[in-house]
Amino acid sequence: MNIATEPKLSGKPFTDKPHKRPVRMVRWFIIIGTLLALLVGGLVWFNYFRGKMIAQFFAGMKPPPASVNIATAKSETIPNLLTAVGDLAAVHQVNVTSDVNGRITDIQFTAGASVKAGTPLVQLFDGPEQGDLANYKAQQRVAQISLDRAKQLAERQVGPQATVDNAQAVFDQASAGIAKTEAIISQKLVRAPFDGELGVRKVEVGQYLTAGTQIVSLTDLSVLYANFTVTEKDSGQLKVDQIVRIAVDAYPGRTFEGKITTIEPQIATDTRNIRVQATIQNPDKILKPGMFATTTVVLPDKPPVVTVPETAVDYTLYGDSVYLVSEKKEEDGKTSLQVTRTFVQTGNRIQGRAEILKGLKDGDRVVALGQLKLQSGSAVTISNEPVPPIPAKPPRY
């Protein structure tokens, strides 16, 4: 039986082949694929070209040279100074007191005045002592008359020597009473023990003054002591008569000069410091005892050392460095300046200059101002603006 010819059966004969896809649809797929490939390739090429052009732009774009101030490192002999802190003390300073008790009857000084040694300051009531003095003087006169008469009789050999001796004893007792009373009277008149400046008055007329009560302070300002301490390591550099310069906060920018007069022979066991005392002449009397003082001892000069302005050194946790200026020859033959960060070993800083122990040599040029806008390899130009004074002093208002 032939299935294909059977009327009750449906379907296609097994011998029929499937139809092929139309040629037009295949063509569209090819066109769309080609367009997608071109689009993706164009995007890839555009990104590559854009990145390359950006890189060329930034590679060819150089920042303008930074304007900086340049200083030259130089070898010089700088002062060898030892700095310490201390205070000022008076060579002669005392709180004037009375030796005896008594009531104040007269105050003979003005607070803050300058006085000479022996100037009367305070008078205590001495009426009883003046009476005793008059009594002893009267006794002395009578004793003197009796002594003279006894001596005349003894010379004529009509009077015994014992009478002369007794008269002499009475006279001496009267003289001793006078001397004692005059000493007590002198204690009732308080005088300045030395030349100096008086302080604030602390007593009043009519006040009963007990022995030892402070009346007024007296200070000799013509000469002062500068007391300071140095470490055990630095004590070996100190000698008597070395020059010391003193600076105080009350007179900024001004120094006062003196000499070391005393070096403590013992070193403190708790601090390992040694106490030093210098004597400072104070003719203008502007320095006062108790002032905080910065002392600088002038030591013998050290060998010459390379120095740069203190502002040229960049102090960081990673070390001290400077920007070393060097010349660079460009492709067009022109010469430009560039900087290189160079680490250095620094020493002391004195009068606005820093010692360079290692890293620079005499004649090297470094950036003195304008380091904040630099990095190693940056191009620079020399600024025409004047360099500010070093160290800079803030304005006073």
Image (cartoon, rainbow, N blue to C red):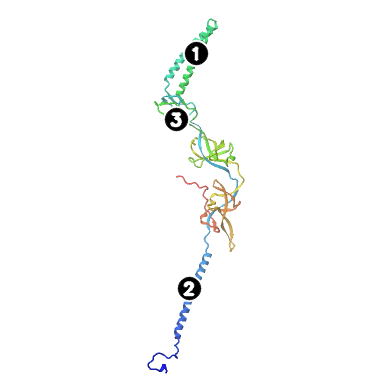
Q: Reading the chain from its start, which is encountered first: label 3 or label 1? A: 1
Q: Is residue 134 above or below residue 206?
A: above
Percent position of residue 192, x then y: 48, 27
Which residue type does callout 2 highlight? Leu
Per the image, the residue denoted by label 2 is: 43
- The image's mark for residue 216 is 3
Q: What residue is rendered at 47% in x and 17% in y? A: 178
**Alpha carbon distance from label 2 to label 1:** 138 Å
Structural crowding at the residue carrying mark 1, measured as other residues with C-alpha within 10 Å and reported as few (<14), some (14–19) or many (≥20) = many
Res. 261 in view: no
Q: Position of residue 357 (x, y in %)?
A: 59, 49
Vertical relation: 26 (above or below) 290: below
Does residue 124 appear left or right of residue 308 in this picture? left
Comes first in the chain, label 2 or label 3: 2
Residue at image coords 46%, 15%: 136
| Residue hosting label 1 | 171
Q: Residues within 10 Å of mark 2 (few under 14, many from 20)?
A: few
Give the label, 3 or 1, closer to the camera.
1
